[in-house]
Image (cartoon, grey):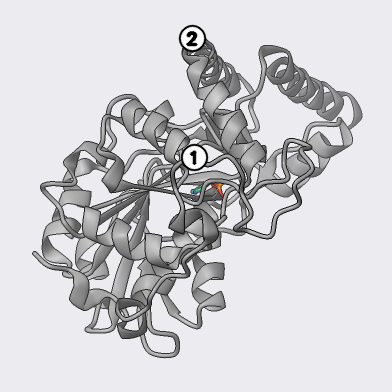
Amino acid sequence: MDLSFLVRKNIQEITPYSSARDEFESTADVYLDANENPFENGVNRYPDPHHKNLLTRIAALKNIARENVILGNGSDEILDLVFRCFCNPGKDNIITTPPTYGMYKVLAKLNDVVCKEVLMTEDFSLDIEAILQAANENTKIIILCSPNNPSGNLLPASQVETLLERFKGIVLLDEAYIDFAGDFSFATRLMEFPNLFICQTLSKAWGMAGLRIGIGIASKEIIGFLQKIKPPYNINCLSLQKAEVLIQERQDFDTRLKLLLSERNRLKEALPAFSFVRKIYPSDANFLLVQFADADTMYQYLVDKGVVVRNRSTQPLCDNCLRITVGLPAENDMLLTALKNYKLEESTFY
Ligand SMILES: *Cc1c(COP(=O)(O)O)cnc(C)c1O
């Protein structure tokens, strides 16, 4: 299946900017080609536009070929590149499935692309028929988020497969939280689904939100188009270096991940004891979506106690819901203590 017909004409025809570091790739004694400042301070040279070292490490980590991977300045940049590659402004549209990550709609607006919204079902799975019905010949991308933010659940794999098979455009699967979910990534299934685009990140389980490194995973052809249009020096050299170092500390990653998962479980088991907790949704991520009797009041109460969570109660299907990130054990204790005291204050004063 050749998907290049989906790519915007101007992108197909673009000749990428060729940077000094593109044109001369081996090592020399003296670099007088990029108008850099010659005084060494650790950052006076342009970073590697191909992110070779980090890309090699990440591809190995995910067990995918390097040619199937592109790195961006956070997943936000990867998502933006996908929009720009496939969606003609003022003409094309995408489909999202609220409640989901708010950035998709913002990026659609930014690119002058209509964002059609097809609500999830009550149990936060996909309404496949409604999604396919909403798609027309100008629908270029269906964006799915699994595990989904803010609901926390993995989407049923069979539903993702159905859309990949029946939708003739790009299925963009945002797997920002996949490391918390066990072995369910679609990243090893590129050969089965040429229209699959996966987005991952170092921001969540890998603990590098401050570095801004997003990962795009797709067919060699799609990755090739994105390489052509990405800004040449999109990841700075300090981020590249630091990410390489932190990825090598694999042991820390494993123990921390384990701890976060056991803390997620501890919160999940402690929360039902509170009379004002209505429902805890199943989570495959590092947060819990929790329905309270009165989310706005609880949100404000927690803020007053110094504990900030995310109020999602205005989102569809998230009535009275707060999204609570799993923190360190002591931080989670502070949350639980605040909730305990809420009950006390309530019975004492009201
Ligand atoms: C946090 C998050 C991301 C990560 O974005 P970065 O730009 O890589 O930090 C992507 N998608 C979803 C759904 C998220 O919640």
User: Could you tell me residue 147's position as x and y percent?
Assistant: 40, 40
Q: Amino acid at mark 2?
A: Gln
Q: Residue at x 76, y 38 (%)?
A: 40
Q: CA distance from mark 2 to mark 1?
A: 34 Å
* Left or right: 344 as drawn, with respect to 96: right
Q: Is residue 305 above or below residue 92?
A: above
Observer able to see residue 331: yes
User: Which of disc 1 and disc 2 is earlier in sequence?
Assistant: 1
Q: Is residue 208 above or below residue 109?
A: above
Residue for badge 2: 251
User: Could you tell me residue 38's position as x and y percent?
Assistant: 75, 47
Q: Residue at x 36, y 70 (%)?
A: 95
* Left or right: 129 as drawn, with respect to 346: left
Residue placed most toward the observer, 161 or 48: 48
User: Could you tell me residue 171's position as x and y percent?
Assistant: 27, 60
Observer able to see residue 292: no
Q: Residue at x 59, y 32 (%)?
A: 241
Residue 27 is marked as 1
**Comparing labels 2 and 1, the label whose residue is closer to the camera:** 1
Q: How many marks?
A: 2
